[in-house]
Structures are given as C-alpha cells and as structure tokens.
Image (cartoon, grey):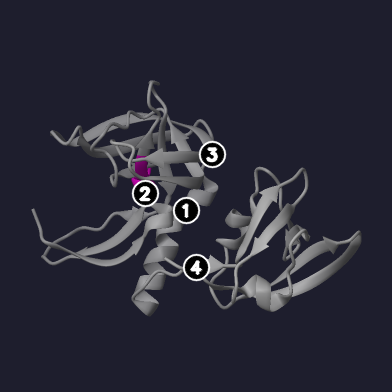
C-alpha cells in the first residue's frame, strides 16, 4: 500500500489523476484507444469484489462509442459517459480503475462500470481521455473542460438551443435561443456524434466555428471556448 496524492479530479469523465512516491516502479505503456477494433482481444486487471487482488480476465472488445449512465452502488450519484468501450472481459465491483489491455500489454482503457442484471457487459473509458487529462495536469496542474454554454435538445441533424448561459462563450458569440447548431469546425453534429463529444476534442481558449441556422438563414459564428464550471 502507498499513500497517494490527488493531483486533479475529472468528475465528468469519472477520472482522477493521482501520484504516489516510491522506487523501482515499472510504468505500463499507454496505447492508442482510437485504433482499437470490435472483436480484438481485451484483458482486464483489477481487484475483483475488493477481495481478489490482481485478478485477470480475458475477452474481446464488444462495442465502441457507447453512451452509458453510470451510478455508484447505492445510486446516490450518476453521470453520463460518452465514447465508452464495451467488453465481455469480466469486470466486477473492485475492477474500477484497473487497466484494459491489448495483446501487446498496452493500456487501451480504464475499467469503469458494469451493466446491472447482465453478464459479459462491462465498460471502460478510452485511454486517450486519460492521456489528455494527464497532459493538462503536467502543464497546468489542473484539468479543465472546454465549455460552450448552451442548453439544447437534439434533433435529426444538429441541436436546437433551448437556453444560453450568462457570460458563456455562446453568449459572447451571439448564440440565441432557438438557433440550430449544425456543425462545429465542419464536423456534423448527429445523435451518435453529440455536440458535447465534439467540444471535448478541444481545449478551453480554442476558437471554433459554429455553422448555425436562425429563422431559416444559415451563417457561421466564431466562438472562443470557455472553462466548464466544476
């Protein structure tokens, strides 16, 4: 057991960056989760049920780009996670935080949840999300989420703005209620490619171009992404 220092929290992604002190640690290799494919072998490691340390289970990547609602065991806290890896490698309580590996021993995900009432349906956060968080901590000592600042409902194509947060990037850019946002920097917003997921590819302070329609008139609007309130 080692004492750990929490460097930064990323509650929206159910992640924390922590640091331990010690010698002779051999770090794992962080892979590239953007290149994984359905059907490839996946290996999960963790402390199953909090009792069986270093448990290893093997399966395949069963699905990609899943969106799930995850909650703690008592149901007092829940969050929506997007872009999640689905695997049938056994993931039990106690596996959260353990690595999901490929056959080269590279970490492609972080085990995070399991489907209640089902067998062989586990979920892992893509490692590229964690890599981005780690890079931010190294550079700035904190994790910052980009923030546009609109409440919206999804439509067949794009999103319909239902409200704009005061002082946000959207308000400063002139986004108004009932605007329809079709794309961000040319990337189309769809049901499977949500606006939230697209925005998460950028950093606070980045300029993005929104293609919108307002009263049947199409236009491009530039916005400087702000920081999401934690």
Q: Earlier in the sequence, mark 1 or mark 2?
A: 1
For label 1, the SS is loop
Q: In this view, does 126 lie above or below 122?
A: below
Locate residue 80, reporting x and y percent. Answer: 48, 46
Looking at this rendering, what residue extends furthest in the left direction? 1
Q: How far apart are marks 1 and 2 (CA)?
A: 8 Å
Q: Residue at x 11, y 65 (%)?
A: 23
Q: In this view, does 205 lie above or below 62?
A: below
- Mark 1 vs 2: CB contact within 8 A: yes
Q: Distance between the residues labelled 1 and 3?
A: 14 Å
Query: Residue 106 shows which numbered tag?
Result: 2
For label 2, the SS is strand
* Residue receiving disc 4: 228
* Residue receiving disc 3: 64
Q: Over which residues does the magenta segment extend?
A: 104-112
- Mark 4 vs 1: CB contact within 8 A: no
Q: For residue 3, which quarter of the picture? A: bottom left
Query: Residue 209 shows which numbered tag?
Result: none
* Residue receiving disc 1: 32
Q: Is residue 171 above or below residue 218?
A: below
Crowding near the residue tagged with mark 1, few <14, some 14–19, many ≥20 C-alpha atoms within 10 Å: some
Task: Look at the image and say whether residue 170 sits in the magenta stretch.
Answer: no
Left or right of residue 207: residue 64: left
- Tell me which secondary structure the magenta stretch mostly adopts: strand
Locate residue 87, reporting x and y percent. Answer: 43, 32
Locate residue 95, reporting x and y percent. Answer: 27, 38
Of marks 4 and 1, the one in the foreground: 4
Q: Earlier in the sequence, mark 4 or mark 2?
A: 2
């Amino acid at each position: 057991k080692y004492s750990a220092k929490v460097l930064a929290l990323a509650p929206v992604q159910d992640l924390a960056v922590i640091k331990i002190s010690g010698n002779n640690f051999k770090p794992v290799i962080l892979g590239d989760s953007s290149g994984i494919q359905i059907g490839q072998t996946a290996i999960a490691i963790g402390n199953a049920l909090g009792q069986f340390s270093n448990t290893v289970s093997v399966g395949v990547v069963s699905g990609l780009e899943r969106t799930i609602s995850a909650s703690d065991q008592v149901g007092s806290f829940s969050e929506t996670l997007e872009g999640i890896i689905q695997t049938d490698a056994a993931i039990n309580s106690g596996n959260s935080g353990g690595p999901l590996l490929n056959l080269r021993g590279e970490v492609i995900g972080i085990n995070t949840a399991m489907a209640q009432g089902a067998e062989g349906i586990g979920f892992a956060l893509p490692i590229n999300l964690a890599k981005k968080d780690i890079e931010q901590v190294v550079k700035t000592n904190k994790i910052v989420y980009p923030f546009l600042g609109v409440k919206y409902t999804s439509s067949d194509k794009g999103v319909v703005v239902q409200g704009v947060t005061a002082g946000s990037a959207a308000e400063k850019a002139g986004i108004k209620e009932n605007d329809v946002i079709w794309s961000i920097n040319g990337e189309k917003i769809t049901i499977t490619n949500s606006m939230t997921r697209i925005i998460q590819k950028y950093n606070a302070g980045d300029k993005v171009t929104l293609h919108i329609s307002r009263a049947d008139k199409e236009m491009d609007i530039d916005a400087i992404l702000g920081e999401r309130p934690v």
